[in-house]
Amino acid sequence: MMESLLYPCMTVTRMKLSLDGMWKFSFDREKTGEENHWEKGLSEYEMMPVPGSFADLYTDKKKKNYCGDFWYETDFVVPGISESKRCEKRILLRFGSVTHRVVVYVNGQRIGEHEGGFLPFVFDVTDCVYPGINRLSVKANNELNEECLPCGTVRKNKDGSLTAKPYFDFFNYSGIQRSVELLLVPNTSVEDYSYVTELVDGTAKIDLKVKLRNGEVSGDVNVSVKLIDENGKVVLEERLYNYDKESLSGKTMENKTCDFVSSEAGCVSEIECLRYTKSLSVESPFLWNVRDAHLYDIIIRVTDKTGKLLDEYTDRIGLRTVEVKGKEILVNGKPVYLKGYGKHEDFNILGRTFNYSVARRDFECMKWNGANCFRTSHYPYADEWYRMADEEGFLIIDEVPAVGMMRSTHNFVDAGTGKYTYFFETPTVSKLKNNHIQQVREMITRDKNHPSVIAFSLFNEPETTSDYAYDYFSDIFEEARKLDPEKRPLTGALEKNSSPEKCKCHPLLDFISLNRYYGWYISGGEDFEEAEGKFRDELDRWKALGVNKPFIMTEFGTDTLAGNHSLPGTMWSEEYQNDYYEMNFRVIDDYDFIQGELVWNFADFATSEGIFRVGGNKKGIFTRDRQPKSAAFVLKSRWEEL
């Protein structure tokens, strides 16, 4: 599997072909697919859309809630390439995501596997395909456990079937949920790049690094960069300088090539990884700002010593800085107050499948009521969300799928009761930590170049009240700080059990994120008048700690049935939701260390069935089909004034 998670683009040297469409699909209830060589062809199947979440496409409940192995299969065509050109090109297979784990076969040959259902992965299949029709087979699995993210468990039923039991409050949508693409890229190509911006006296200083995969072992190559502003003006064009070489296995090299062996595909090729860098300057730059996005086209070109073009990669970048200073979050050196939402990738029938129309509607709704930020709760979203946020000037708190780190299938209720489940004191923790670090690595590798991403969230509502939890998360945060070239702020969302007196992990956070439901799970309904006092009491205790950091309210809200009205406002009515937010805002406004409010949730979303959920979680400010509840107007009035 390749490390490069660059968003695929079309240039004069690169081509991408979509493999989206209707694929063959089959459940593997007995888990005998590999034994019966399903990778060589499915004999019994139905047709399934890719990308897609299979659950909501069925009318049969067993299929909707299916848990276990399942297979996809499709044929794809590799364009004919002359022998001389073929040695200059690589053929890559890119999956946007497969939930939660996958083994991939091409023409019956196992080419690799991936763990984690919310990030892309790429395989080099150059030596596994041939011109004409090829077969792609995928074995996926959506079971939950305590060794992988997100966390949960599985119940075995009397008939032998499995039922997923999430430790989290959203539906366990599964499948090939994002696009699949075939990429043709040069053998010598841009593998990755990163940039860090510093603003000095009206000038943007840019520290640019490019990682190059060099298949042209006969000599050195040249790497140059061009930056074009929004008016089409070329603001810089410079050559970068090589500063080291390494093998793709990560070992530093001494100006020589190495044999790189892909054990998965059985292919051997001589390649080296080159790193190039340059400090660049843009005078009087157009800065990327909150709800005022200005982007530059970046063009990275690779040529050989004769000037022949080997590769060209293009992207859009924004010049801006972000930092935490005292109790403030600064973008381009100026304080910003976060207004917006926790969200989900969730829509009727589509499940967690990315759809441009849904995304566009979401951004329009958020702009309409004055939002400027959202958290990708509780997993990294499809690439396109970030690219759209870059264009719109929205801020993103990017979250790894570290959710469910408390043994509870009703964690939203148990959070705040003092329940302790010894989650970080079990033998599975070592494997979980390795998985957690790998998914943090993939998230930061993919999303590090987005100006919209101002922070990384490394957990949501785990048990944080033990030294075991502190030791666990210390390693996660240490690794994340090494990985991000921009050194963005790091955070994680704390549930009610993580009180100021008991939480061991809040010192790890650059800003503290609180999920609190005073007036709903705590002192809701007839006890509502007690909620404000309890909320203030906790914030006073946080203040007493003398924590010189910003606080963000990353979750607060009430379940509300659209169209349900009552006077006086009672639980589940729109009036109650309005009263709830007005009370919370009164409290928030009295504490200057609170620097943001991300309400829960942007829109109603699907969950597992249960007596606490009426057709899913109804805490949305918008309905699941993106129509406003009364609270949307309350937020609009407030956020347009802030």
Image (cartoon, grey):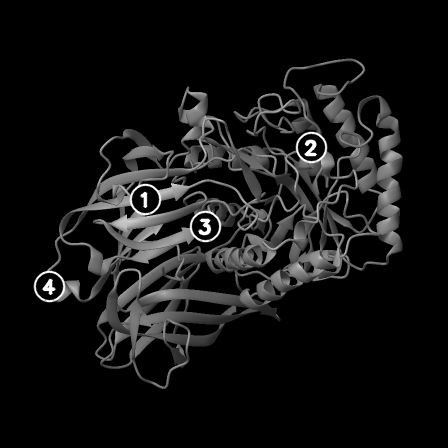
Residue 83: assigned label = 4
Camera-nearest label, 2 or 4: 4
Residue 635: assigned label = 2
Camera-nearest label, 4 or 1: 1
Query: From the image, which quarter does the C terminus lie in?
Result: top right
Residue 567: assigned label = none
Give the residue at x 39% y 70%.
211
Compared with residue 227, is residue 116 higher up or lower down, i.e. above or below? above
Report the amino acid beneath label 2: Leu
Name the N-terminal-most of marks 4 and 3: 4
Q: CA distance from mark 2 to mark 1?
A: 44 Å
Name the N-terminal-most of marks 2 and 4: 4
* Secondary structure under the numbered disc 4 in the rendered image: helix
Name the residue beneath numbered marker 3: 119
Q: Are marks 4 and 1 in contact (CB under 8 Å)?
A: no
Name the residue beneath numbered marker 1: 138
Give the residue at x 61% y 28%.
617
Report the amino acid beneath label 3: Leu
Q: CA distance from mark 2 to mark 3?
A: 32 Å
Q: CA distance from mark 4 to mark 3?
A: 34 Å
Name the N-terminal-most of marks 4 and 1: 4
User: Closest to the observer: 367 or 417?
Assistant: 417
